[in-house]
Amino acid sequence: MIRRGALVLAVLAISVLSLASGDYPLSLGEVFGALTGTGDAQFIVTEFRLPRLLAGLLVGAALAAGGAITQSLSGNPLGSPDMIGFTEGAATGALLLIVLTDAGTAETSAGALAGGFLTAVAIYLLTYRRGVQGVRLVLVGLGVSAMLIAVNSYLITRASLRDAAAAQSWLVGGLNGLGWEHVGPVAAAVAVLLPLGLVHGRRMALMEMGDDAATGLGVPVERTRLVLLTVSVGLTAFATAIAGPIAFVALAAPQLAKRVVGSLRVGASALVGALLLVTCDFLTQRLFPAASLPVGIATGLVGGLYLLWLLIGAWRRKRA
């Protein structure tokens, strides 16, 4: 409980710092005044900085919670939505509309949602053999993800220069330009799906002991797995629809949370995901203020370092 409290305080601290920092620096008093509806800085905070912050918190929490679920179900730290095809499927759905129909923001988001869910259904059906085994889920997901990456690359090569630039920018993933109209959909998804994942958290922990053990303890394994996969896909698809396929948050945040609280937990992972994404966005804005770099570049760097750390750890354990 104390560690979770520390995570909450860290999220609050980076949130206040994000609202106070920028081209027009604000004091803490001005930030709190703007949030309570008073002060000269209300327009800057409520119309520009607050929507971006909330979008970052919600997207980070959604991606990390979805990653915690799939990593738990697969029993593999690499079994996250961006590794086993869910995120790439959402990207394919969005790219099809961007390239073929000159879609706007709403259509792109709808395409990402449809692509994510259709990919998840295909992976589940390909994986199901008298149940869904974790290793098979990861292997099938990696294969589907590789094929979808190829499809996405092909779509970009067939697009016009303008559409290709828009598609490539969206594929990086970021929070630039997000407003209140983007916050609402992902907030609704998190409000509905995250509590559902938390409610099934105990069953998820029991299933980590194996299907037979979980069944013996009264867990309806396949029904629980299907519900949890639906929650994971929904959170991932909505987050991707709003911010694009931001890399490695779903992969790294659950494992970082595990080292804080001792086990894979949906709630702790959501907190770490929100903290990770907003911190990366804050550093990107402060270090490169003129470039407007997408936060996906920073999370990609963090994810690459995380994978390198995993490989070094595995190599050391092998030698020991």
Image (spheres, rainbow, N blue to C red):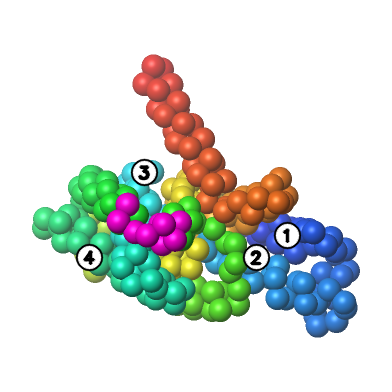
Q: Residue furthest front?
A: 161
Q: Residue at x 50, y 63 (%)?
A: 243
Tell me, yes or no, whether the two marked residues, 1 and 2, touch with CB atoms within 8 Å: yes
Quarter the N terminus occupies: bottom right
Please provide percent x and percent y for residue 134: 25, 49
Q: Secondary structure at mark 1?
A: helix
Specify the segment rendered in magenta. 157-165
**Residue nearest the viewer, comparing 23 with 205:** 23
Q: Helix, strand, or loop for circle 4? A: helix
Q: Is residue 271 visible?
A: no
Which amino acid type is marked by label 2? Leu
Q: Pointer 3: residues within 10 angstroms few (<14), some, or many (20+)?
A: many
Q: Main secondary structure of the magenta part?
A: helix
Three-letter amino acid code at the position of disc 1: Ser
In magenta stretch: residue 160: yes
Residue labelled with disc 4 = 121
**Amino acid type, label 4:** Val
Specify the quadrant of the image occupied by residue 29. bottom right
The residue depicted at 73 percent of the width and 59 percent of the height is 18
Where 116 falls versus 104 (above or below)?
above
Residue placed at 41% from the left, 62% from the top? Answer: 163
Amino acid of disc 3: Leu
**Residue 205 picture location, percent across and down:** 37, 56
Q: Which residue has dot 2 on it? A: 53
Q: Nearer the viewer, mark 2 or mark 3?
A: 2
Q: Quadrant of the C terminus?
A: top left
The spot of residue 198 in percent (x, y) is 45, 67
Residue 314: in magenta span:
no
Label 2, residues with CA under 10 Å away: few <14, some 14-19, many ≥20:
many
Q: Which label belongs to residue 18?
A: 1
CB of mark 4 within 8 Å of CB of mark 1? Answer: no
Residue ID for mark 3 = 78
